[in-house]
């Protein structure tokens, strides 16, 4: 969906909860003997569903336990109520009565919590997983066997590995598929396989073209390890990547329609955010003035690398002391960094320090959604040591992005490599609807202060 893979259980859960959001107001109105007002119910249901998306409740990377999920459902309903009140301020005929709105929200909150409890405790996720057979048992196949996070294994279950001819076996031998001398199609059929992942370390050795073609014609999907891991993990794994994949993979487009819609979305979103956050901007400037005096700088500019490697000045609220880098050497913020001011600790945690970047968006230096812009010094360093690092500059940098949702604050080369994998996934698959989804889920990052330093 929107060039982004969504697991079937997540889709089914979203549909069930959308049905609850529509049904709960109808049930309440029926109990009171009133005829349901369709338009009011649709406004309420749409607001709640968007708020549930914003709280990350349909993200496969959601790791909150049941209490955390219920907390997010409750916050989503509060956000939805606020959104309904704000929206119907301009469209009064669509405004539900205050008691109506509370009753609708209370019932839908209760029903969704029950559904979440049932899905968490009783439903077997394996029933929805694709059964996968891996052709290869070497280094590339090992990268698949090392997936440990539950979120990375929600879409599949490995039935076994078949070592390629002349390939060293690096995966657990207990995971080997039976019958290495049997036909690939027969092995796949006996295991009930839905998909074969080709994970050979060297395809120049006897590539089983005929056998894989037989499996493909028998209705068994065949996919290479790079595309499989991209689909399942939401990132482009550098350890299995080869340059030819960039050339032949679907994506990495710069079509004029996409560029126009992205720019139009950026301008609209920037003006909207600026209008909504003006009180927070004024309060932040006041807080900085109280802590450092009215003559202290409120903003700071810093050189960052943007689209196609062009350097621009990013604008932020100042969250560190004026002499944060007295020796002129660039360094990342660390946990408990003493350079961060008292106001800075707060605004960095809830991302208010990023708000002035809307002016960078309006100028065209940045987009609302994209890879985070890095300083030229770090880009030069990583460009020499991290493979494919410069490819992240094929898209405009963003205030928020896919890597920020999926990975915490990065302050090392290892972190840069991890975030690059998510950035490459975004550069390859970005669409307007994917941008909207990322923007919505950024609300959860801000509300819960994820990754801020």
Image (cartoon, rainbow, N blue to C red):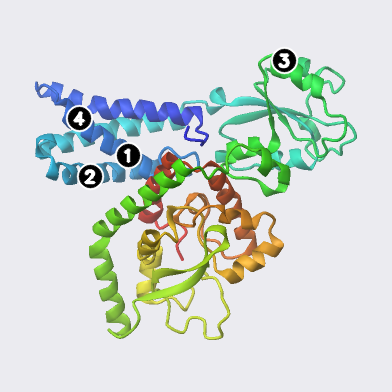
Upstream in sequence: badge 3 or badge 2: 2
Q: Which mark is residue 83?
A: 2
Residue 68 in view here? no
The residue wearing badge 3 is: 189
Picture coordinates of residue 124 (x, y %)? 52, 26
Using the numbered discs, state the Cα–Cα distance from disc 2 to disc 4 in whole angstroms: 14 Å
Using the numbered discs, state the Cα–Cα distance from disc 4 to disc 1 in whole angstroms: 14 Å
SS category of the residue bearing label 1: helix
Residue in view at x 49 percent, y 55 percent: 396
Q: Tell me if 35 is positioned left or right of 233 in this view.
A: left
The image shows residue 271, relative to residue 27, as above or below, that is below
Q: Which mark is residue 41?
A: 4
Q: Which mark is residue 50?
A: 1
Q: Tell me if 263 is positioned left or right of 331 in this view.
A: left
SS category of the residue bearing label 4: helix
Using the numbered discs, state the Cα–Cα distance from disc 1 to disc 3 in whole angstroms: 42 Å
Upstream in sequence: badge 1 or badge 2: 1
SS category of the residue bearing label 2: helix
Circle 1 residues within 10 Å: few <14, some 14–19, many ≥20: some
Picture coordinates of residue 230 (x, y %)? 61, 40
Circle 4 residues within 10 Å: few <14, some 14–19, many ≥20: many
Upstream in sequence: badge 4 or badge 3: 4
Upstream in sequence: badge 2 or badge 4: 4
Residue in view at x 40 percent, y 58 percent: 449
Using the numbered discs, state the Cα–Cα distance from disc 1 to disc 2 in whole angstroms: 10 Å
Circle 3 residues within 10 Å: few <14, some 14–19, many ≥20: some
């Amino acid at each position: 969906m929107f060039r982004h893979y969504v697991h079937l259980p997540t889709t089914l859960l979203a549909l069930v909860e959308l049905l609850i959001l529509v049904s709960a107001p109808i049930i309440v109105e029926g109990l009171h003997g009133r005829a349901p007002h369709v338009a009011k119910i649709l406004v309420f249901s749409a607001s709640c569903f968007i708020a549930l998306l914003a709280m990350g409740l349909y993200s496969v990377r959601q790791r909150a336990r049941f209490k955390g999920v219920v907390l997010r459902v409750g916050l989503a309903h509060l956000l939805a109520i606020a959104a309904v009140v704000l929206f119907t301020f301009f469209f009064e005929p669509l405004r539900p009565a205050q008691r109506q709105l509370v009753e609708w929200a209370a019932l839908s909150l209760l029903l969704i919590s029950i559904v979440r409890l049932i899905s968490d405790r009783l439903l077997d996720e394996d029933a929805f997983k694709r059964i996968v057979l891996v052709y290869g048992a070497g280094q590339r196949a090992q990268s698949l066997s090392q997936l440990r996070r539950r979120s990375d294994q929600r879409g599949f279950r490995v039935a076994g590995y078949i070592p390629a001819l002349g390939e060293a076996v690096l995966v657990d031998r207990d995971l080997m598929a039976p019958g290495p001398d049997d036909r690939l199609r027969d092995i796949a059929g006996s295991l009930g396989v839905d998909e074969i992942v080709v994970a050979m370390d060297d395809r120049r050795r006897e590539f089983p073209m005929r056998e894989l073609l037989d499996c493909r014609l028998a209705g068994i999907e065949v996919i290479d390890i790079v595309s499989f891991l991209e689909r399942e993990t939401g990132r482009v794994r550098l350890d299995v990547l080869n340059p030819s994949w960039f050339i032949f993979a679907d994506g990495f487009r710069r079509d004029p329609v996409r560029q126009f819609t992205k720019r139009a979305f950026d301008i609209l979103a920037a003006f909207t955010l600026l209008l909504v956050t003006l009180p927070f901007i004024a309060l932040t400037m006041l807080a900085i003035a109280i802590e450092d005096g009215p003559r202290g700088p409120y903003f700071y500019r810093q050189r960052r690398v943007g689209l196609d490697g062009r350097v621009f000045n990013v604008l932020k609220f100042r969250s560190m002391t004026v002499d944060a880098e007295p020796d002129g050497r660039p360094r990342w913020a660390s946990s408990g960094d003493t350079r961060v001011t008292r106001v800075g600790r707060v605004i960095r945690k809830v991302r208010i320090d990023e708000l002035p970047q809307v002016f960078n968006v309006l100028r065209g230096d940045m987009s609302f959604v994209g890879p985070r812009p890095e300083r030229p010094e770090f880009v030069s360093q990583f460009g020499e040591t991290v493979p494919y690092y410069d490819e992240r500059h094929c898209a405009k940098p963003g205030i928020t992005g896919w890597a920020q949702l999926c990975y915490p604050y990065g302050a090392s080369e290892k972190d840069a490599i991890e975030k690059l994998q998510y950035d490459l996934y975004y550069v390859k698959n970005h669409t307007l609807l994917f941008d909207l989804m990322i923007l919505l889920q950024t609300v959860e990052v801000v509300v819960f202060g994820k990754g801020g330093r």
